[in-house]
Image (spheres, rainbow, N blue to C red):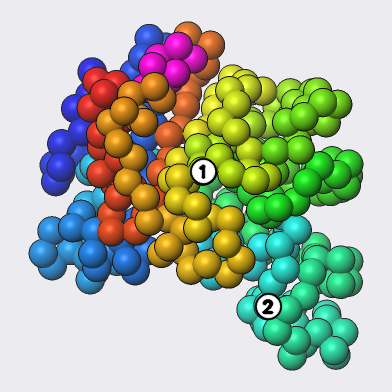
Amino acid sequence: MKQLTLGTSEGAQPLTLGACHVYIGTCSWADANFVKEGQFYPRGVGTDPRKRLQFYSTVFPTVEVDATFHALQPALFTGHDTDPRRLPKEIIPLLPESLRTAENASAAQLPEEALIGCWDYFAAFVDVLIKAGKLSHVLFQFPKGQGYTPELFEHLERWEPYLRRWQVAAEIRHRSWLEEPARTEFFSFLKQKGYAYVIPDMVQWAYLPPPDIELTAPWSVVRFHGRNPAMLERRAPTNRVYDYSYSADELLPWAETVRDLSPKLERMYLLFNNHYRGQSARNAREIAVMLE
């Protein structure tokens, strides 16, 4: 069984539980607070992007690339509003004049040719990772507070010519998706398409979904968001939302769940999003030790 040793020159490998490969990592390696206050990177590494990623890869075998949501490609594909001024410069001329200088817009406001252009840009970015053999899956995280709607299925069907190129994982953030009859419809759709359901761990208040275990593909994803109640606050800064450290008592049941699920899966991804002060890396390491 592979040991995850800090700072070794060899790239980290997934853990093996029978025939299942378990990839453990964080949802960022370059978040500003994670780098500055996380006490993860050795001296002289945190300020160098190349060395930073090289070091990270010796500790964890996988990482979530969120740049496509936050910077490189605004999140038009999942129903989030975006700043159209951040779109690729070649797409700006395709927008109506009123949107070219707007601070906020939804995908529904963009012309068809602009949306297709955005998808083409995103696909080109993903293709780079595919050619390098570095892509595991593409995550579609739908907005917090978006309850069940058949429009999500229509949206995914509309862009299926792109989605069929990739392994796709879908994450919802409203418990109405897990209540009947929506639950059966949702999971049946994911199974039909071969998309993995993302199992979330987060604070259990209000509309946020419970960590129900559902397998809809031969692989699975668990995303650990932390259990900070600030997740429900409007416009709460991410450093508050993701300021949470899992205790051993909270992680041990997940380690047992992973062991129980491993005979049914080819691979699992355990990704920690509680990045503030490097808590994601510490918790990822802790659950890895529990599974070794």
Closer to us: mark 2 or mark 1? 1
Give neighbour class at mark 2: few <14, some 14-19, many 20+ (Cα, 10 Å).
Answer: some
Pointer 1: residues within 10 angstroms few (<14), some, or many (20+)?
Answer: some
Q: Which residue is depicted at the point 41% across and 64% down?
A: 239
Could you say whether the residue bearing mark 2 is in a helix, strand or loop? loop
Residue segment shown in magenta: 255-261
Residue underneath mark 2: 83
Label 1 residue SS: loop
Which residue, given by chain and number where applicable, does mark 1 sit on? 203
* Label whose residue precedes the other's in the sequence (2 or 1): 2
Q: Amino acid at mark 2?
A: Asp
Residue 16 pos. (x, y %): 34, 18
Q: Is residue 38 above or below residue 48?
A: above
Q: Position of residue 106 (x, y in %)?
A: 79, 69
Q: Quadrant of residue 195?
A: top right
For residue 103, above or below residue 108? below
**Front one among 203 and 142:** 203
Q: Is 177 left, or right, of 10 in this rendering?
A: right
Q: Quadrant of the N terminus?
A: top left
- Residue 288 against residue 257 in the figure, above or below: below
Q: Residue at x 67, y 23 (%)?
A: 216
Evaluate whether residue 176 shows in this view. yes
The residue located at (58%, 51%) in the rendering is 127
Residue 155 image point, x, y percent: 84, 48
Q: CA distance from mark 2 to mark 1?
A: 29 Å
**Which quadrant of the figure has residue 170?**
top right
* Quadrant into which the C terminus falls: top left
